[in-house]
């Protein structure tokens, strides 16, 4: 990044000027240079403009992890549009909702996906163009991706956007209700990019492996950061099987790997059986909650030369904190310190700042990465964005319970909307999960609450065990009784082969709640 990069798409154009013949993206073992990516995205932008796309109109992209998604991202920005990238496995009713809610002018997807949707250019006034990656265009309002690239002069007209204009809307899955569209400006995304680069420092010698969904902001920023650094992005299908990951790590001499714990556990188990170690990897990253000791051990075993970055954030501000690699062992359970150019603090239920260490409060974020608001949702926006201490600014009330230690390191304690009231006491599932993770042999753990006649909400735990571990439900419950306060002891523990996951690799809490309601288990309490 440099001072001349005012809009996000300037990043690609600058890197093409520096590295035109260098591999920008490797997908399906095909290499696409910076010059090819810049040219294709410009042609797509020109095609969109020829078809009437106006400044700040929304374009929904539903293609999954493939090079056309990368091309569409940069092309939409060059055309002056707003990118709304959605996972290919998004249920049809959810995708219908997003197309309508975003008031999308263009939908870019596959012929198989469009066949499942109720939206059409004939039925929805604002949807003027459907672009299909494959198949035939079956109506005047539909075109193929390839034909769109061939329209116009190949060079888009200046879009006229400013850095305060929207670059993207990222729809959050949410635990309940309809998804909310997080509005991110060019300034938001460039600020996040600059902050991330300050401590991660991707460089033009890096090969970055990404099998995280590009519709997931953690995956999306792998692509943006790689392009920004002049690195090579090795793009794989979402959550590729461990065998393929091992092959790609070796084939392309991968140096940077972002993980979610699910991927890490699968890769570690598979690689451990084969004695595989990856000494060329210089950095591994994780975001979400803190890394558990077992996960850290797995990373060290797989990647003996790598720096380990544990990070935490929300779509609403991209990233809040990171734990410097040198603190990975001496700050167990911490998600670190504020990222550069960001300020954080905690407030109590009376909205008073908490200065004492180890007191739990709601996390508040101040910085240029904070979203512009929720798309067409002023009520939700007002709850999340509130006046800051200085005139004219807004700060983000995250809805996350956290604490700070004496050194200013942050510890995630749970979501405010995921607190469980058991026996009249508020319980953070995250706290109980952390205890379960501390039990030797527990590889994954999740806790949900279900209605219960006598305790209000009952805590139901689901765990999976590591290879060779032998623990019974009763042994686990006894450990909980010994180590947790009574109101934090689960009513039931279910041992599963694996925990169900959402498309973004997160534990599917709704599915677990349904399993808990249906399970025929003995209640303890």
Image (cartoon, grey):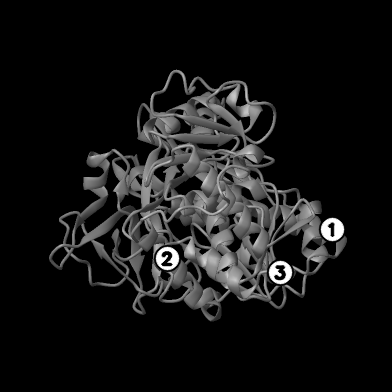
Residue, far front: 153
Q: Which mark is residue 273?
A: 1
Residue 353 in view in this figure: yes
> Marks 2 and 1, Cα distance to the nearest angstrom?
42 Å
Drawn side of residue 477 relative to residue 163, left or right: right
In which quarter of the view is residue 298 placed?
A: bottom right
**Which of the two residues, 30 or 14, is positioned nearer the viewer here?**
14
Placement of 520 over or under 422, stated as above or below: above
> Marks 3 and 1, Cα distance to the nearest angstrom?
39 Å
**Which of the two residues, 425 or 54, is positioned nearer the viewer here?**
54
Q: Tell me the crowding category of disc 1: few under 14, some 14 to 19, or many 20 or more residues within 10 angstroms, Cα based.
A: few
Placement of 452 over or under 365, stated as above or below: above
Sequence-first tag of 3 and 2 = 3
Drawn side of residue 483 relative to residue 316, left or right: right
Drawn side of residue 467 relative to residue 477, left or right: right
Sequence-first tag of 3 and 1 = 3
Drawn side of residue 90 relative to residue 244, left or right: left
Residue 264 location (% of width, % of height): 67, 57
Residue 173 in view in this figure: no
Q: Tell me the crowding category of disc 3: few under 14, some 14 to 19, or many 20 or more residues within 10 angstroms, Cα based.
A: few
Residue 50 location (% of width, % of height): 49, 41
Kindly state the secondary structure of the residue where label 2 is placed.
Answer: helix
Which image quarter is the C terminus in?
A: top left
Residue, far left: 391
Q: Residue at x 57, y 47 (%)?
A: 44
The residue carrying mark 2 is 190
The residue carrying mark 3 is 21
């Amino acid at each position: 990044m440099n001072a001349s990069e005012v809009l996000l798409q300037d990043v690609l154009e600058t890197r093409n000027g520096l590295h035109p013949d260098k591999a920008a993206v490797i997908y399906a073992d095909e290499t696409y240079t910076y010059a090819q990516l810049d040219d294709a995205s410009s042609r797509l932008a020109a095609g969109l403009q020829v078809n009437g796309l106006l400044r700040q109109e929304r374009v929904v992209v539903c293609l999954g992890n493939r090079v056309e998604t990368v091309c569409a991202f940069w092309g939409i920005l060059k055309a002056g549009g707003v990118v709304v990238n959605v996972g290919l496995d998004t249920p049809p009713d959810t995708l219908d909702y997003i197309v309508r809610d975003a008031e999308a002018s263009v939908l870019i997807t596959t012929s198989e996906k469009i066949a499942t949707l109720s939206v059409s250019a004939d039925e929805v006034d604002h949807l003027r163009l459907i672009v299909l990656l494959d198949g035939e265009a079956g109506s005047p309002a539909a075109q193929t991706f390839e034909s769109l690239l061939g329209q116009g002069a190949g060079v888009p007209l200046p879009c006229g956007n400013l850095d305060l204009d929207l670059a993207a809307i990222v729809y959050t899955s949410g635990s309940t209700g309809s998804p909310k569209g997080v509005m991110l400006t060019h300034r938001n995304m460039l600020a996040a990019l600059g902050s991330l680069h300050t401590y991660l420092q991707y460089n033009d010698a890096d090969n970055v492996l990404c099998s995280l969904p590009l519709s997931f902001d953690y995956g999306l920023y792998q692509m943006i950061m790689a392009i920004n650094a002049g690195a090579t992005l090795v793009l794989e299908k979402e959550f590729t099987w461990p065998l393929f990951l091992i092959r790609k790590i070796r084939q392309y001499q991968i140096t940077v790997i972002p993980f979610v714990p699910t991927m890490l556990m699968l890769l570690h188990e598979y690689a451990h059986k084969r004695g595989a170690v990856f000494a060329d990897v210089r950095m591994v990253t994780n975001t979400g909650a803190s890394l558990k000791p077992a996960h850290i051990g797995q990373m060290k075993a797989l990647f003996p030369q790598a720096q380990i970055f544990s990070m935490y954030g929300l779509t609403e501000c991209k990233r809040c904190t990171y734990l410097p690699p040198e603190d990975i062992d001496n700050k167990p359970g911490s998600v670190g310190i504020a990222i550069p150019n960001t300020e954080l603090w905690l407030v109590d239920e009376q909205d008073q700042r908490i200065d004492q260490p180890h007191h739990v409060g709601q996390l508040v974020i101040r910085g240029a990465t904070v979203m512009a608001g929720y798309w067409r949702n002023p009520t939700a926006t007002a709850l999340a964005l509130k006046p800051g201490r200085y005139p004219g600014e807004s700060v983000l009330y995250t809805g996350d319970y956290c604490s700070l230690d004496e050194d200013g390191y942050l510890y995630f304690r749970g979501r405010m909307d995921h607190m469980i009231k058991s026996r009249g006491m508020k319980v953070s599932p995250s706290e109980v999960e952390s205890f379960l993770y501390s039990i030797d042999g527990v590889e994954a753990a999740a806790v949900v609450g279900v209605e219960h006649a006598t305790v209000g909400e009952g805590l139901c735990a689901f765990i999976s065990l590591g290879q060779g571990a032998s623990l019974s439900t009763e042994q686990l419950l006894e450990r909980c009784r010994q180590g947790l306060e009574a109101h934090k002891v689960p009513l039931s523990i279910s041992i599963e082969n694996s925990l169900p996951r959402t498309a973004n690799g997160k534990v599917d809490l709704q599915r677990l709640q349904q399993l808990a309601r249906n399970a025929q288990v003995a209640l303890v309490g």
